[in-house]
């Protein structure tokens, strides 16, 4: 996976909310995007995930312009409050696979694997409206991972989740990144989480890219004053 | 009170004794209502979905007109259909007035806006979320539409049942275009009106109870469906 962003801007009603000159995310990285509210984090991953379109600039994935090609087969998004199809857990996980014409046997096998890895075995037949917040997030993650996307975009997936479930999700992200090479872009406010999980960090402020680089290095020694302020402010909380 | 208790007893008698006239009236009521609801569903649902998923010039006016027609007085619908179908009217050549077909047409005019308006409301609420999900999971436009309809199944069923409620309980329009002709266009509601005029309150209540039982069965089916689907 190689994601390249060039001269990207996004405006809402004439107001610029995103302005990124140049950003490259290499294959297989686990990238955290951090920044205060209104920094443009969600707008950025929505543009990458083609849920939103840029005002100007270019976003290319594997050297293909995202506007001209449809990369949906290769990437997916999971939101802070994911929407589950109003049916059972296993049917949610199976849905993207059915769209891609997987056989019943392969679907069953994939559901077995994901439910086991995410501790959802006992919930397979459960209707989704009977799930807790953490379970919902795990089902959304299992569904997103079902078709083995090359790039997974996550928008604060553990914001309202208990620490145990957060840990399970983090371990799962690290595992698929390591074993399957899935590229992950994680929008988070949780700096310890970014430190635990990610190897690359991007700091946005008021729509602009302030700093990017190795996650641990930036968190330890931020080169930019704004990044430092943000990190220190977050750590005080 | 006496009429009510007699009516209840008579209702049971009418049902279990197999009163031919009453069964014929029930049969026609159901035929007219189901036919009009079936056609209205095929008209109103796609229009409601189209309205909810597309933006175009004049959409606001169409929504306002739809909402207005949701509470269209049946007598106005009946009168309009009657005038169109009357011998000297634009469709007079078909000679449909005082036939069940005219009654179905009048009810379609009443039920379609209800199905369309309620469908639009559900689509407006669900479509953005479901489409967003469909995009993220790589669904085609067709698959996204299928998913949207699946996600709206309970609301759409409720819209159809609301339309059926309007159709089965409606009296003004079917009276005007049907004429309450015995053995031909007499349905439960027009029969109740006639029985009341004739002072046969017990039988009017009995037919009313049968009407209520039918409404209860339809709603019970919907309730079971909703319970099964967990909402």
Image (tube, coloured by chain):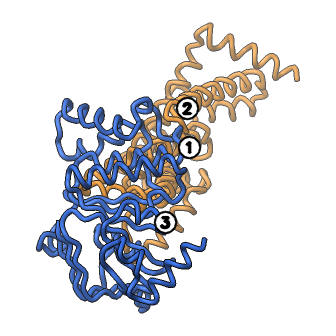
Chain colours: A blue, B orange
Q: Quadrant of the N terminus of chain B?
A: top right
Circle 2 marks a residue in which chain? B
Question: What kind of element bears circle 1?
Answer: helix
Circle 3 marks a residue in which chain? A
Query: B60 and B138: which one is in front?
Result: B138
Q: Position of residue B76 (x, y in %)?
A: 58, 56
Residue most extreme to the right: B1
Q: Is residue B48 above or below residue B28?
A: below
Residue drawn at x 45%, y 86% is A206
Q: Is residue B226 above or below residue A172?
A: above
Residue drawn at x 34%, y 45% is A142
Tag of residue A190? 3
Circle 1 marks a residue in which chain? B
Q: Is residue B231 above or below residue A84?
A: above
Residue drawn at x 23%, y 54% is A149
Of the residues under marks 1 and 2, which one precedes in the sequence?
1
Residue drawn at x 42%, y 46% is A168
In space, the residues marked 1 and 2 are separated at their CA atoms by 18 Å
Question: What kind of element bears circle 3?
Answer: loop
Residue B135 seen by the camera: no
Query: B26 and A13: which one is in front?
Result: A13
Residue most extreme to the bottom: A14
Q: How many numbered marks, from 0 up?
A: 3
Q: Is residue A5 left or right of residue B147?
A: left
In space, the residues marked 1 and 3 are separated at their CA atoms by 48 Å
Q: Is residue B206 above or below residue A53?
A: above
Tag of residue B227? 2
Q: Quadrant of the C terminus of chain B?
A: top right
| Crowd rating for badge 1 (residues with CA inside 10 Å; few <14, some 14–19, many 20+) | some
Q: Can you identify the residue that label 1 sits on?
A: B162
Question: What kind of element bears circle 2?
Answer: helix
């Amino acid at each position: 996976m190689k994601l390249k962003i060039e001269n990207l801007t996004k405006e809402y009603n004439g107001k610029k909310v995103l302005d990124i000159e140049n950003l490259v995310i290499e294959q297989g990285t686990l990238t955290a995007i951090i920044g205060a509210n209104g920094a443009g984090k969600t707008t950025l991953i929505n543009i990458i995930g083609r849920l939103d379109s840029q005002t100007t600039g270019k976003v290319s994935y594997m050297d293909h312009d995202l506007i001209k090609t449809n990369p949906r087969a290769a990437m997916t998004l999971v939101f802070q409050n994911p929407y589950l199809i109003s049916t059972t857990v296993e049917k949610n996980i199976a849905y993207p696979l059915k769209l891609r014409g997987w056989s019943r046997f392969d679907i069953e096998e994939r559901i077995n694997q994901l439910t086991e890895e995410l501790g959802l075995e006992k919930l397979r037949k459960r209707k989704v409206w009977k799930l807790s917040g953490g379970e919902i997030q795990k089902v959304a993650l299992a569904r997103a991972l079902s078709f083995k996307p090359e790039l997974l975009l996550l928008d604060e997936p553990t914001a309202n989740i208990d620490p145990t479930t957060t840990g399970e999700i983090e371990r799962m992200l690290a595992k698929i990144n390591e074993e399957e090479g899935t590229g992950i872009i994680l929008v988070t406010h949780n700096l310890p989480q970014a430190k635990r999980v990610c190897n690359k960090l991007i700091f946005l402020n008021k729509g602009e890219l302030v700093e990017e680089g190795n996650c641990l290095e930036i968190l330890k020694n931020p080169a930019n004053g704004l990044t430092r302020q943000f990190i220190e402010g977050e750590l005080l909380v | 009170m006496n009429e009510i208790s007699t009516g209840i007893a008579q209702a049971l008698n009418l049902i279990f004794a197999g009163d031919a006239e009453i069964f014929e009236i029930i049969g026609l009521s159901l035929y007219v209502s189901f036919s009009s609801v079936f056609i209205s569903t095929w008209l109103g649902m796609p229009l409601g979905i189209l309205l909810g998923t597309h933006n175009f010039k004049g959409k606001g006016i169409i929504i306002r007109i739809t909402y207005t027609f949701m509470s269209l007085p049946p007598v106005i619908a009946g009168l309009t259909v009657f005038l169109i179908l009357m011998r000297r009217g634009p469709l007079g050549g078909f000679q449909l007035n005082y036939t069940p077909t005219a009654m179905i047409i009048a009810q379609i005019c009443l039920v379609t806006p209800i199905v369309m308006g309620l469908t639009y409301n559900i689509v407006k609420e669900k479509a953005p979320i479901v489409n967003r999900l469909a995009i993220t999971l790589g669904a085609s436009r067709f698959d996204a539409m299928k998913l949207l309809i699946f996600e709206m199944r309970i609301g759409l069923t409720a819209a159809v049942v609301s339309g059926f409620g309007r159709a089965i309980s409606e009296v003004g329009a079917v009276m005007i275009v049907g004429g309450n002709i015995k053995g031909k266009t007499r349905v439960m509601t027009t029969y109740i009106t006639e029985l009341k005029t004739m002072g046969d309150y017990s039988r009017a209540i009995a037919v009313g109870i049968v009407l209520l039982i039918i409404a209860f069965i339809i709603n019970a089916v919907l309730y079971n469906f909703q319970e099964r689907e967990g909402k």
